[in-house]
Amino acid sequence: MEFTAEQLAELLQGTVEGNKDAAVSSLAGIDNAGKNALTFFYNLDYIHELYTTDAGIIIINDSFTPDKSFSNNPTLIKVADARMAFGQVLKVYKEYKTAQKNGIHPTAVISETAQIGENVYLGPYCFVGENAQIGNDVKIYGHAFIGEDVKIGDRSIFSSGVRINDECIIGEDCIFQSGAVIGSDGFGFQPDSTNRYEKIIHVGNVIIENHVEIGANTTIDRATFGSTRIKQGVKLDNLIQVGHNVEIGENTVIAAQSGIAGSVKIGRDCMIGGQVGFAGHQKIGDGVKIAAQSGIQGDVEKETILQGSPAFEIGEYKRSYVMFRKLPDMKNQLDKLKKSFNN
């Protein structure tokens, strides 16, 4: 795929400085871009790379004026925000690559009762179960599994090895990275009189709304009754466990290796760091921010910022941590005082 500087400037609503007909066919970081590559510059820490890069076209902020001492003579595209603009190029590039995938591979297994939309791609050895409904422009890559009675909205993408189990509902424009499992049984067991654990059957499902992205090897359990619900715009990183009957509010983002126990309700616009653990049945307000490796063991009011395990307000945590680091010195001082009294 080849872009000219003029085309890129039109896409990004920017202006060209240099050869408007200059063309690039690849994307690269500024430190390893070749003459046929497009790159971007926004961080002054990398000013040396700006002047020594071999890139053919560079996207830069319109607020920055280079001194023209380039080893190469690149064409510049000036935009309001170079990083966001390059992200837009990456999106267009990915959409172009994805659009090339269509049709049904001869090894795909599709139930006769499944409903398949227009311009759908079904890759090698993928499976579509009874009564599944797949929308238009959906891409399902090799070895993915779509269970019975699953409903999938338009333009959603399922990477290789994704599992969408029976009766789950997926919205539009969702992305599932490889190994994600949606709708497995929740971790529900009840001990009997001999302390032997009997399995609690989960008959609910998982509902994932529009514009959600689920990372690689992330798992979302089906509800005991009703639905585990991931609301619009949520972004989940890799290796996250979401328990049964959890609800995650709109536009909340959660980093890798976090674990959310059953029936937790997380509000909208929250930011949750990696390896955060939630005890069951907690209610987390809107706009909450939680630092990495924190442990949540109670309800959290909206707009709160937390850190620690168990977690508490971040300002208080930082003050406490300062004291914690001083404990060895404080002990030494105490030992000296005790010794002086004993003498």
Image: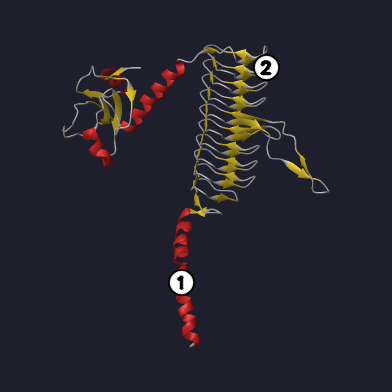
Q: Quadrant of the N terminus?
A: top left
Which percent across, then down, holds residue 207? Answer: 61, 29
Which percent across, then down, holds residue 100? Answer: 45, 15
**Where 265 sits versus 333, above or below?**
above
Which percent across, then down, holds residue 228? Answer: 63, 34
Disc 1 marks which residue? 330
* Numbered mark located on residue 185 in the image: none
Q: How many numbered marks does the figure carry?
A: 2
Give whichever of 341, 15 is nearer the camera: 341
**Where 96 sits versus 342, above or below?**
above
For image coordinates 47% across by 53% down, the residue present is 314
| Precedes in sequence: disc 1 or disc 2 | 2
**Where 95 sits versus 69, above or below?**
above
Q: How is the image coloured?
A: secondary structure
> Residue flagged by tag 1: what amino acid is it?
Met
Q: Is residue 205 left or right of residue 10?
A: right
* Numbered mark located on residue 131 in the image: 2
> Residue flagged by tag 2: what amino acid is it?
Asn
Could you say whether the residue bearing mark 1 is in a helix, strand or loop?
Answer: helix
For image coordinates 53% across by 33% down, the residue present is 216
For residue 81, say whether it is visible. Answer: no
Which percent across, then down, holds residue 286? Answer: 52, 41
Q: Is residue 341 left or right of residue 7?
A: right
Could you say whether the residue bearing mark 2 is in a helix, strand or loop?
Answer: loop
Quarter where residue 198 is shown: top right
Crowding near the residue tagged with mark 2, few <14, some 14–19, many ≥20 C-alpha atoms within 10 Å: some
Q: Is residue 255 left or right of residue 183?
A: left
